[in-house]
Image (cartoon, rainbow, N blue to C red):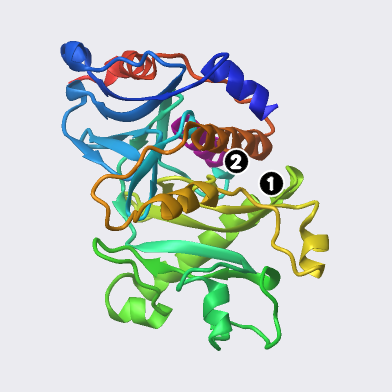
Amino acid sequence: MARRLLRSCFGASPTTTSQTSHRSSTDHSKANRPVNDMEVLKETDFNFLGPKKAGKVRDIYDRGDKLILITTDRHSSFDRIIAHVPWKGQVLNQVSDWWFDKTRDIIGNHVLATPDPNVTVAKKFRMVPVEAVMRGYLTGVTDTSIWTRYSTGKRDFGGLVLPDGMKKNQRLPRPIFDPTTKEDTHDRALTPSEMIAEGFITAELFERLRETALAIFARGQEVAARQGLILVDTKYELGMDENDELVLIDEIHTPDSSRFWQLASYQERFKKGEEPQYFDKEFLRLWFKEHCDPYKDEKLPDAPVELVEELSRRYIQMYEQITGEKFVCGEKPIGQRIERNLKWYAF
């Protein structure tokens, strides 16, 4: 299904990826307009929306009491952009919107409108400087992952003391709230008492954050299971409104912010000591490691078109499995479509 849809979105014979910027109509003559089938949204420059802040994936326009969040097709790794993946931005934006709707009875969210497949207009809130990380399984390979820390002897995680002898990818006795700080330089994994002592959060707010994250994660696991998926771990960002009530912001349960495994094959693979079936983006990262030094080289080679196309197909596949809905490709040219849909928000 996803592969057939990918062909219909790209056209009959995709050969190259058009990596274009999209400027507002006052500057259209300077834009290199996309001419190839694999059009991507590389960046935006809509001067009628005011100043822009560019994140790894989103272009953010601050409108005072609201934010206009445009999710591009940028794909980052090694602390830099390594590719632009067709339809990735639309997938991420629409998956988040779908999950925001599924969890609004648990907690309010920042969404005011979604005027375009790649765009969310959001109310601005005070950010809680703690990232709510939730873990349901003993897995991961990074230094901060729960499996790495368990392997080095740590047993107490978020008030849950794990027994010796657990195996990688094993389900935890209960989900763990394992937060980190949110800082400009480097996020840190601190204990609750350390976070409170350093002034990141009060004890009362920490407990509210924990209870809220546990409730959202439980809902996510429940809904994912109905779609044949395991929501393994994720992270949430929360803000506070004028009444000091928590509000869910940023994104939720996307393929970029969350780890998903296929439910049907999990038990058999776990018993055999095999890795679960998962949404794999690592193949593109590995290609760059094999063909250059992505941390040191000033200029990176272009990602192979066939790998970019395959990654795009996988994003679409995840959209369809998570939501249970067919992915509908947004109208092209993408930049012109977004500009038209955002004219209502001009100064």
The amino acid type, in three-letter code, at marker 2 is: Lys
Left or right placement of residue 204 versus residue 233 in this view: left
Q: How many marks?
A: 2
Residue 223 got which mark?
A: 1
For the residues labelled 2 and 1, say whether their Cβ atoms are less than 8 Å apart: yes
| Residue 335 location (% of width, % of height) | 33, 19
Q: Between marks 2 and 1, how big is the CA–CA gap?
A: 9 Å
Q: Residue at x 36, y 52 (%)?
A: 292
> Residue 34 location, x and y as percent?
35, 16
Q: Residue at x 45, y 34 (%)?
A: 85
Secondary structure beneath dot 1 equals helix
Tag 1: residue type? Val
Q: Which residues are magenta?
A: 89-101
Could you tell me what secondary structure mostly forms the magenta stretch?
Answer: helix
Report the front residue among 147 and 243. Answer: 147
Visible in this render: residue 159?
A: no
Q: Which mark is residue 102?
A: 2
Check the picture and name the quadrant holding the C terminus.
top left
